[in-house]
């Protein structure tokens, strides 16, 4: 994920994050497919290193879970960013510093077969302390591979 808007670099520095994505996300090779007012999706190209078993040609369950968690956290962060726009960097940083995954459920519906995988998410509810999301992972044929529900701290 090489996309970091200059507008948010100050916020990232204030929170104490590097102005780059964590190495794990870079290792996975995730890219942002869509990032507009209401939607975010991330994409992953299949590689041998991401397979469950050599020769299996299916994504490892941990990679699927990671994508589900990453898109859930990303959609919450995107919503928080929009909600806190206009607040000082310090006020924004206070909300983001405490953001983390509290609970994650992944339902594996079929093997992760495919060449390209896309994860999408929506926020079901945001409260003062927690946000709940619903996530989906599809392959390039639009086959649903996995769904998830995540709870994230937001305050």
Image (tube, rainbow, N blue to C red):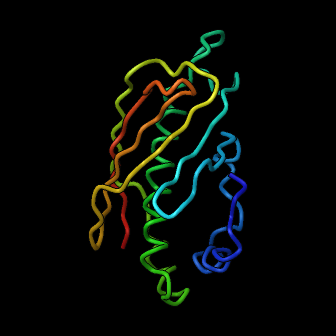
Q: Say which residue appears at 37% left-offset and 58% top-offset.
A: 152
Q: Name the residue furthest bottom.
A: 88
Question: Observer-nearest residue: 32 or 61?
Answer: 32
Question: Residue 44, how many percent across, how many down?
Answer: 63, 36
Looking at the picture, how far across and down is residue 32, in whole percent?
A: 63, 50
Circle count = 0
Q: Position of residue 52 (x, y in %)?
A: 57, 20
Res. 114 image quadrant: top right
Of residue 40 and residue 84, the one placed in the foreground of this image is 40
Place residue 149 in its image quadrant: top left
Tell me: residue 46, above or below residue 135.
Answer: above
Q: Which residue sits at x=62%, y=15%?
A: 57
User: Image point 55% across, 37% down: which residue?
Assistant: 118
At x 42% / y 48%, what residue is drawn? 121
Q: Position of residue 150 (x, y in %)?
A: 35, 49
Quadrant where the C terminus lies?
bottom left
* Image position of 96 with respect to 122: above or below: below
Quick check: 61 above or below 31?
above
Residue 152 falls left or right of residue 70: left
Residue 54 position (above or below residue 84):
above
- Residue 132, located in which quarter of the rendered image? bottom left
Q: Residue lying farthest top?
A: 55
């Amino acid at each position: 994920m090489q996309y970091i808007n200059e507008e948010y670099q100050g916020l990232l520095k204030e929170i104490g994050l590097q102005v780059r994505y964590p190495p794990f996300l870079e290792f996975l090779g995730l890219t942002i497919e869509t990032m507009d007012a209401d939607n975010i999706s991330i994409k992953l190209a299949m590689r041998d290193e991401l397979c469950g078993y050599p020769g299996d040609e299916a994504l490892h369950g941990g990679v699927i879970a990671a994508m589900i968690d990453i898109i859930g956290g990303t959609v919450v962060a995107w919503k928080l960013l929009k909600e806190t726009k206009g607040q000082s960097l310090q006020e924004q940083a206070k909300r983001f510093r405490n953001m983390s995954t509290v609970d994650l459920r992944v339902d594996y519906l079929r093997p992760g077969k495919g060449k390209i995988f896309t994860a999408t998410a929506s926020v079901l509810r945001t409260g003062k302390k927690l946000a709940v999301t619903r996530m989906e992972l599809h392959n390039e044929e639009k086959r649903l591979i996995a769904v998830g529900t995540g709870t994230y701290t937001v305050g």
